[in-house]
Image: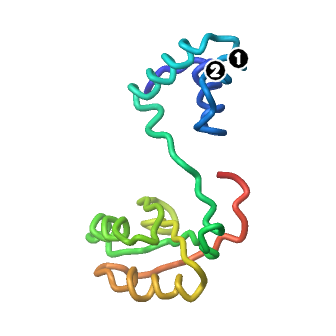
Amino acid sequence: MVEVDEVDLRILKMLQEDGRRPFTEIAENLGLSESAVRKRVQALQRKGVIKKFTVEVDPAKLGINTVAIVGVDVDPTKLLEVAQKLCEVKEVRSVATSTGDHMIMTEIWAKDGRELTRIISEKIGKFEGVKKICPAIILEKLKE
């Protein structure tokens, strides 16, 4: 575990809200110098606390009208193999192995329900070891 103080946590919160927020603005909010904020962010990056700066995409703006969380149950001997194959499907945005109701959880983006059905039946459903696929379409994302 990496040690972080309250100032680091406040910097992280501001960067999570807007990864492009200027260090000068963060410094002003925290009563620090810009160079102090820069050094703290660089240290958080070196320690692996900040893995990357990224962009949050609005799928609807790209014509993606169906976002689904999909649970996938597999033969236990095929768990990692199926998870890796899921990572290679371009419509699959995230893949995680899990405990609970499903062995693998994915997030899939599709232009509509018909495309989601095609992805499930023609791609995921054909992977060796897949036993059950349980899609849940997201109605509204309230918090990221």
**Image coords of residue 104 (percent x, y):** 43, 66
Q: Which of 76 and 28 is in front in this view?
A: 28
Q: Which circle marks residue 107 in the picture?
A: none
x 46%, y 31%: residue: 49
Looking at the rendered image, the quarter that the N terminus falls into is: top left
Labels 2 & 1 near each other (Cβ < 8 A): yes
Label 1 sits on a secondary structure element that is helix
**Image coords of residue 135 (percent x, y):** 56, 77
x 60%, y 23%: residue: 23
Q: In this rendering, is residue 101 above or below 31?
A: below
Image quarter for residue 97? bottom left
x 61%, y 66%: residue: 59
x 60%, y 82%: residue: 112
Q: In this rendering, is residue 103 above or below 44?
A: below
Q: Which circle marks residue 28 in the picture?
A: 1
Image quarter for residue 60? bottom right
Q: Is residue 111 left or right of residue 72?
A: right
Task: Give the alpha-carbon distance from disc 2 to disc 1, as whole Å.
Answer: 6 Å
Q: How many labels does the image show?
A: 2
Colour pattern of the rendering: rainbow
Give, as a three-letter code, the residue at label 2. Answer: Thr
Question: Mark 1, residues whose alpha carbon is within 10 Å: few (<14), some, or many (≥20)?
Answer: few
Q: Nearer the viewer, residue 124 or 63?
A: 63
Circle 2 residue: 24
**Image coords of residue 94 (percent x, y):** 46, 61
**Image coords of residue 83 (percent x, y):** 35, 66
Q: In this rendering, is residue 21 above or below 5?
A: below
Question: Mark 2, residues whose alpha carbon is within 10 Å: few (<14), some, or many (≥20)?
Answer: some
Give, as a three-letter code, the residue at label 1. Answer: Glu
Label 2 sits on a secondary structure element that is helix
